[in-house]
Image: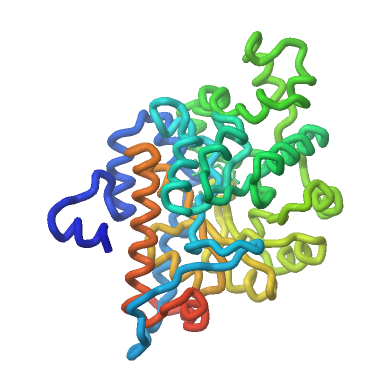
């Protein structure tokens, strides 16, 4: 409401309240290499566009005469009560979003300001411990890219546990990087690579693989990282993955109901339905269209969702289709780019404000009511 009435009174916030304007402002403000990396997706980006557009095919029906004067957006996840069902998806390049190069710390401060959990990527400019220290009371989750070296994986997970992260989110869809023409045309990867290795460079196991420290020879350390990135995981690795931690284990990138069932049978505590925002594989079904089947297959196991959420309305639709909590990637990254921690926090607050208002006018006082109301496919 604070945002809404400030806007009505002509006091427009520095960071726009809607995604289209946000992206346009970020496009005008960001260095080309950064914009290319954030905005781009796989192939001709059909899946990426479809992720967002497909929300239009789902519609919700308002209910009247319900007292919605107070709304409760809280949800239960991993034994915690989260104040809202929103979280920040892992974005591996947060560091380049802010001029000081510490976008990961800024994202964590946005989490602290808003109470919206941050899922911290393995690929960060700041070590995971420093990020955790900025989270305040807000929970963090650690996103794991499994390197080929199992001892290194174990070390990263141990560090995440010691730093107080509340879940380990293993991303399954990125053992290699997808075909991203924008980045390839701009020869972006070589220049971006050196930015995202703080968790490796600070890791005792990784350092043990090097002849000279990353401080002495960064090029060799980057080369070593390229060699270890991206273990090919199969279901046979599930017992090992499960044994890595007592924290809740989340599998990110699950899109098929059979995979959801298999993950749960093998001990996953949550399913994360996502197609990586259309960055990894083109030609896929829109993520939101895959969510209902994944939810149905997951039974009582929580389902996290991201890919294509651009508004509070999209958030509510994903929750209506059964997501336990929903994430955004690019929206908060653009907020970081335009206004640092405050900018990202503003984007998150706007998403929540719109979701809250929609629940108020639609007659859904709680997230359980949203879910009970559901959403229907509409022809156009
Ligand atoms: C990502 N994503 C991602 N996912 C992950 O598991 N680890 C990572 O390091 C990254 N890095 C990353 C960088 C950038 C620039 C983007 C845009 C995305 C994927 C991310 O977690 C999420 O799945 C998508 O961003 C969701 O789609 P939207 O919200 O961007 O449409």
Determine the residue positioned at 81% across, 46% down.
244
Determine the residue positioned at 59% across, 67% down.
76
> Position of 217 compared to 182: left or right?
right
Q: Is residue 277 something that shows in the picture?
A: no
Image location of residue 226, percent across then percent down: 68, 26
Q: Residue furthest bottom?
A: 65
User: Looking at the image, is 320 positioned above or below residue 96?
Assistant: below
Give above or below for 359 relative to 13: below
The image quarter in which residue 106 lies: top left
- 81, above or below 250, in the image: below
Q: Which residue corresponds to the image point at 71% horizontal and 43% vertical from the top-left? A: 161
Q: In this view, does 90 lie to the left or right of 9?
A: right
Outermost residue on the left side: it is 10
x 27%, y 49%: residue: 16
Q: Which residue lies furthest to the front in this view?
A: 137
How many badges with numbers are in the image? 0
133 displayed left or right of 266: left
Q: Tell me where residue 159 sits by quadrant.
A: top right
Decide which of 41, 322 is in the foreground and name it.
322
Task: Give how far across and how far down residue 102 sits, in percent.
Answer: 47, 30
Q: In which quarter of the image is residue 268?
A: bottom right
Residue 356 position, x and y percent, is 37, 68
Q: Can residue 335 be seen in this view?
A: yes
Q: In which quarter of the image is the N terminus?
A: bottom left
């Amino acid at each position: 409401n604070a945002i809404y009435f400030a806007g009505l009174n002509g006091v427009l916030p520095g960071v726009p309240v809607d995604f289209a304007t946000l992206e346009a402002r970020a496009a005008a403000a960001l260095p080309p290499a950064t914009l290319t990396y954030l905005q781009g997706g796989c192939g001709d980006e059909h899946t990426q566009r479809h992720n967002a557009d497909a929300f239009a095919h789902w519609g919700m029906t308002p209910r009247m005469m319900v007292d919605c004067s107070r709304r409760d957006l809280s949800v239960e996840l991993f034994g915690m009560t989260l104040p809202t069902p929103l979280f920040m998806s892992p974005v591996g390049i947060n560091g380049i979003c802010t001029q000081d190069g510490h976008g990961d710390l800024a994202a964590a401060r946005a989490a602290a300001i808003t109470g919206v959990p941050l899922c911290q990527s393995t690929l960060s400019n700041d070590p995971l411990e420093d990020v955790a220290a900025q989270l305040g009371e807000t929970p963090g989750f650690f996103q794991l890219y499994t390197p080929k070296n199992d001892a290194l994986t174990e070390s990263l997970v141990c560090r995440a546990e010691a730093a107080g992260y509340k879940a380990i989110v293993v991303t399954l869809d990125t053992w290699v990087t997808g075909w991203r023409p924008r980045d390839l045309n701009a020869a972006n990867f070589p220049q971006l690579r050196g930015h995202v290795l703080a968790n490796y460079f600070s890791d005792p196991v990784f350092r043990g693989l090097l002849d000279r420290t990353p401080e002495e020879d960064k090029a060799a350390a980057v080369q070593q990282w390229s060699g270890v990135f991206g273990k090919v995981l199969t279901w046979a690795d599930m017992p090992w993955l499960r044994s890595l931690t007592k924290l809740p284990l989340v599998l990110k990138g699950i899109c098929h109901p059979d995979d959801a069932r298999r993950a749960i049978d093998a001990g996953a505590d949550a399913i994360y339905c996502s197609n990586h925002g259309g960055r990894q594989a083109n030609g896929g079904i829109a993520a939101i269209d895959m969510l209902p089947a994944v939810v149905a297959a997951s039974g009582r196991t929580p389902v996290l969702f991201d890919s294509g959420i651009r508004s509070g309305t999209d958030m509510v639709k994903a929750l209506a289709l059964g997501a336990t909590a929903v994430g955004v990637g690019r929206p908060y990254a653009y907020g970081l780019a335009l206004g640092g921690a405050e900018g990202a926090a503003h984007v998150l607050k706007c998403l929540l404000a719109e979701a809250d208002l929609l629940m108020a006018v639609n007659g859904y006082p709680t997230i359980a009511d949203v879910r009970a109301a559901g959403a229907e496919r509409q022809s156009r």
